[in-house]
Amino acid sequence: MNDNYTDLKDKSSIDFRAIFPKILRIWPLILLSVFLFAAAGYLIVKFTTPVYKVSGLFFVKERSSGFSIFEGPSMLNNSNLGLQNEIIIIKSKPITRKTLNELDFNVEYYEKGSYTYNELYANSPLLVEIDWKSPQIINTLVKVEWSDDSQFKLSFNERKNYKYLPNGSTVPLTLIPEPTLHPFNEWIETSNYRIKVTKTTIDESGSIYIKVRDTESLVWEYSGKLQVNRLDRNASILNLSMDVQNYQKGTTFLNHLMEKYMDLELEEKNEVSSNTIDFIDSQVSGVADSLKLFESQLQAFRSTNKIYDLQSESTIVYEQLLDYETRLQQEQFKRQYYSKLKDYLVRENYRELVVPSGLGIDDPILNGLITSLITLQNKKSELLATNTEQSPVVREIERKVKELNSSIRESLINVDQSSKFVIENLTERKAAIESSFRNLPETEQNLIRFKRQFDLTENIYNFLMQKRAESAISKASNKADNKIIEPASFVQQIKPQLRRTIILFSLVGFMLPVGLVILIQIFKTKIEELEYLEQHLKIPVLTSIMKNQKPNNLVVFEQSKSGIAEGFRTLRANIRFLHPADEKVVIMVTSSVSGEGKTFCSINLASVYALTGKKTILVGCDMRKPRIFDDFKLENSQGLSTYLSGQVSEWDSMVNPSGYENLDILLSGPIPPNPAELLYSANFGKLIEELKGVYDVVILDTPPVGLVSETLGLISFVDLSLFVFRQNYSERGFIDALNSLKAKNSINNLYAIYNGVDGRRSGYGYGNSYGYGYYDDSSTK
């Protein structure tokens, strides 16, 4: 179970020990990549327009009553919901539009820097005025340059431009205006624009770029950039922030936005007082004219009749008449207010409603109903800034408004009827006093008439002016419930950040080549390193053989001082530890597939044994794809196949001398139709025994294990089995196949050879050791 776990771990893990040398090998490329990416990051920073964060703190006071724009009706008493509504309202486009209408943001001024265009705010050398009643070219940079104080030149961008029309629509500008000269301080009108440029700098020459922005595009931009968040979940302080390219401009906008929001709140709070003042003013104008008329008539009568004071009896009658007529006028004034109020309710003109208490009408029920109606109407106006008429919240408020409208109209019927009864009673009392009035002398009657008209009008005038003053004082004493806690200011530069950008790009530059090496290593299927083979293979690797760069496979004989020859000597020495040197040995050489160098290894292993004086024979057992005869320039007309098939009874008649001392060759012979059956025949076992009786070393060049089945049957006839892997040729899957073969068949004396090693890349000189410099490696490049 532990072995299986280890196998699974080996297959799933990444061999970093094999990857690390590959990474070190490309360190110049890594340094170059880091440098190039760091340089790219630096250029990106230089070519990126800086973006800054500005923010301010705004306090929202939660109230249970009043006319604050932040107060909701009873159905929205949840404070969190109410505060969230305020956040939506602050971010709404109507508030942004009202703020921008008070700011001169429609013309943006830029100067060209080394890499980017930098916006100028509040320090532009020119002032450009726009006539929005005429077409304008918008949202494109226009170059303005001058060389004296009298005129300037306009140059338009060659790229796509747009023209804003007075009706608010935008159309593409197909014909780009040519650069033209215009005078300063004069309105310039063409078919595409109407502007006025004023020079505000003392510099005689210079140039800047301007961009004309329509208000609607600014509204979308600034409302989109505006971020409103609660500073703390348990507090009603909002953090207003923006990411802008000019932090002075951003702080100006945020401060004006908060001030405008408080102004709108104050306007709604003052609306009731303003309506009351307007209503009283409409009444006072007529009363004032009557007061002047009656005053002049009274003075004229006194002057003509030489009478200035009333007698005691006349005084009593006068005071009673004046009291009744004053009360009568007040009741008639109330009925007039009730009539106008009913008209407002019928027309649903709630913006002009006047609270009765502001006119001295002390009816708590009516006052409460109208106050609630005004509050609901204000809330509806707020919600319509961010909701439609069909939204559930607005529809609920509209339902309550209609209910209050109906209740107020029913209440008006009652109070108007009550006022009518009071008027009738006062009229009767006045008539009774007037009967006593007729008994007075004619002169005093006339004086009482003039004085009564004057005093009555004066009392009404004073009453109205008193109520107007009270409303004006109430309006003047109002202040916004919300306030700016911390004016907007610069916080930090958001991007680009030079240090972080260069570090990030440098990391990318480092990780890119390293990552490519790792990915290549992960997805590679070939065996590239001896370490990988030794780590994953469950059998020992006896030696590594360098790559043969020449067509001659007889390396041991022809290039005895080469690293390849020394590799085979190392193989021979290692076999000596595995098998007693004084005993005869049969060695099988095979591989997974053709092309891994098993024949090359068989020839040179046999050669290195022959050089020691041991009588050696190389047997070509690969009857499907014979190769040995070509290397020794022999005829493959007869060999192992002819012997095993019974065509020849004596094997020694087919043995060929190799041309080298102590080495004989038994070729595979003509390709038979049934090579597997021949190798499994009794003659093959007999052959091996007879060969061992004649030769000290028997080398079998067998077919690849992965392609044919007969090779496994030969293992029982040999003392050692050598499995050949070739660098950059053998698949990594071959390792798993050999491990499985060994485990399933319990094969002993199975060993591996690592063939075709590129000495220039791996650092191997020969065998499993490093070269010492005296071997002739001219065979390798």
Image (spheres, rainbow, N blue to C red):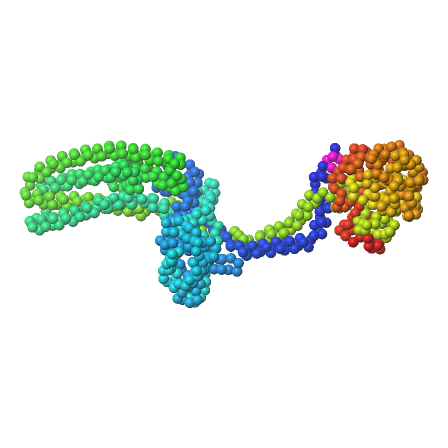
Residue 256 seen in the figure:
no
Write the residue at 46% across / 48% down: 225
Q: Position of residue 27 (x, y in %)?
A: 69, 53
Q: Give the camera-side residue of 680 and 391.
A: 680
Q: Position of residue 623 (x, y in %)?
A: 84, 39
Q: Is residue 185 above or below residue 487?
A: below
**Residue 97 visible within the image:** yes
- Residue range (magenta): 3-7
In this picture, residue 259 sits left or right of residue 781: left
Q: Is residue 225 magenta?
A: no
Quadrant (top left, top right, bottom left, bottom right) of the N terminus? top right
Q: Main secondary structure of the magenta part?
A: helix
**Quarter holding residue 653:** top right
Residue 4 covered by magenta stretch: yes
* Left or right of 409, for residue 219: right
User: Residue 627, how many percent across, how many down?
Assistant: 83, 43
Count all numbered tags in the image, as a single digit. 0
Please name the residue shown 10% across and 50% down the image. 300
Residue 314 is drawn in which quadrant? top left
Quadrant position of residue 134? bottom left
Tell me what residue is drawn at x 46 percent, y 43 percent.
230
Q: At 54% across and 56% down in the image, what residue appears?
A: 47
- Residue 419 lies left or right of residue 193; in this view the side is left
Task: Give 575 or 605, whichever is nearer the viewer.
Answer: 605
Quick one: 631 or 316, which is closer to the camera? 631
Image quarter (top left, top right, bottom left or bottom right) of the C terminus: bottom right
How far across and how far down the image is residue 43, in percent?
A: 57, 56
